[in-house]
């Protein structure tokens, strides 16, 4: 059996995300528009952070830059101690594959694939070994191993989102980004998904950044960052945090 090389040791004292004076601007004619205007923050390993803000506040731009899907106009961004601004496009792609998992509002599942095959997709791109075993382990983590052979049309919305979360987890990312992960779900299923994220954070130690416009969803995180006009206007612990179950309640007979 082929084994993968051991990862380099990580200095747990260094924040996983370090951002200083981050600016993202666009020039339109004679005007310069600022999607981000001097954002600075640190995110520690093992934190569960919610990012909120009105439309146009900069939260999606910040998520895209922190997720290495976009680059800042100026400022510094260190991800796991790596200066993201100095990376080439190929290096950005590599760091996304190695360190980051993404979960989106739309589940982005391929309609013809069974759940286990869907979860294996990032492993195919990453040329990793033991794909099915790792995919099944990821489905087990999200409580969906018994639906491994089901296609998206045979799964509920909440189950499809669990498959999407398993797909994000299968490469063992350092950081999970969840962009409006409950936006297509009813309130009960939304609570289950937030409860699952809490479980992955608290029991698995996974660092999670979640963008949401829903206060009830943000209340499941440990820390809330609120943006306005491209600036941080609030950053602190979540008051009255909601602790939720990752499992659906058992029906009353």
Image: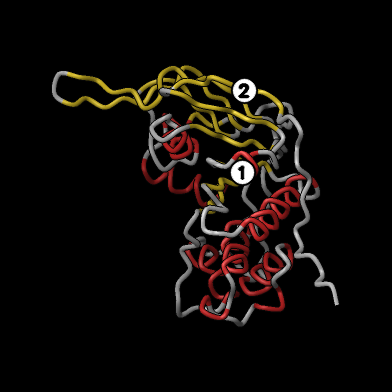
Residue 194, percent from left and from top: 68, 51
Q: Which residue is mark 1?
A: 175
Render colour scheme: secondary structure
Please identify the quarter of the rendering in which residue 65 is found: top left
State which tag comes first along the sequence, 2 or 1: 1
Q: Which quadrant of the rendered structure holds the C terminus?
A: bottom right
Helix, strand or loop for disc 1: strand
The local crowd at label 1, few if under 14, some if 14 to 19, many if 20 or more residues have their Cα within 10 Å, is many
Q: Which quadrant of the rendered structure holds the N terminus?
A: bottom right
Q: Which mark is residue 230?
A: none
Helix, strand or loop for disc 2: strand
Q: Is residue 126 above or below residue 73?
A: below
Residue 185, percent from left and from top: 57, 59
Q: CA distance from mark 2 to mark 1?
A: 19 Å
**In this rendering, would 52 be left or right of 196?**
left
Q: Which residue is mark 2?
A: 235
**In this rendering, would 218 be left or right of 93?**
right
Residue 107, percent from left and from top: 50, 62
As drawn, the residue found furthest toward the right would be: 253
Q: What residue lies at 46% left-to-right and 24% top-to-bottom?
A: 228
Please identify the quarter of the rendering in which residue 169 is found: bottom right
Please identify the quarter of the rendering in which residue 85 is found: top left
Residue 48, percent from left and from top: 68, 38
Q: Is residue 181 above or below residue 151?
A: above
Q: What residue lies at 69% left-to-right and 71% top-to-bottom?
A: 144
As drawn, the residue found furthest toward the front would be: 253
Q: What residue lies at 67% left-to-right and 47% top-to-bottom?
A: 7
Q: Nearer the viewer, residue 32 or 244?
A: 244
Q: Is residue 183 above or below residue 40?
A: below
């Amino acid at each position: 059996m082929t084994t993968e090389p051991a990862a380099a040791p990580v200095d747990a004292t260094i924040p996983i995300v370090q951002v200083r004076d981050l600016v993202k601007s666009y020039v339109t004619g004679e005007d310069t528009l600022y999607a981000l205007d001097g954002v600075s923050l640190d995110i520690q390993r093992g934190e569960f952070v919610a990012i909120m803000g009105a439309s146009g506040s900069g939260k999606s731009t910040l998520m895209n830059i922190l997720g290495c899907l976009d680059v800042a106009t100026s400022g510094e961004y260190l991800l796991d101690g790596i200066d993201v601004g100095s990376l080439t496009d190929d290096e950005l792609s590599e760091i996304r594959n190695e360190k980051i998992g993404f979960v989106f509002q739309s589940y982005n599942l391929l309609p013809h694939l069974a759940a286990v095959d869907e979860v294996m997709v990032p492993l195919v791109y990453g040329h990793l070994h033991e794909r099915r075993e790792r995919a099944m382990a990821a489905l087990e983590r999200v409580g969906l191993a018994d639906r491994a052979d089901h296609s998206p049309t045979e799964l509920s919305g909440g189950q499809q989102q669990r498959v999407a979360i398993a797909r994000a987890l299968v490469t063992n990312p350092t950081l999970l980004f969840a962009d409006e992960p409950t936006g297509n779900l009813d309130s009960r299923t939304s609570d289950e998904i937030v409860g699952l994220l809490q479980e992955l954070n608290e029991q698995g130690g996974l660092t999670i950044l979640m963008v949401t416009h829903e206060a009830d969803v943000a209340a499941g995180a440990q820390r809330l960052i609120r943006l306005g006009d491209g600036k941080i206007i609030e950053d602190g612990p979540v008051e009255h945090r909601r602790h939720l179950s990752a499992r659906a309640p058992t029906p009353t007979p």
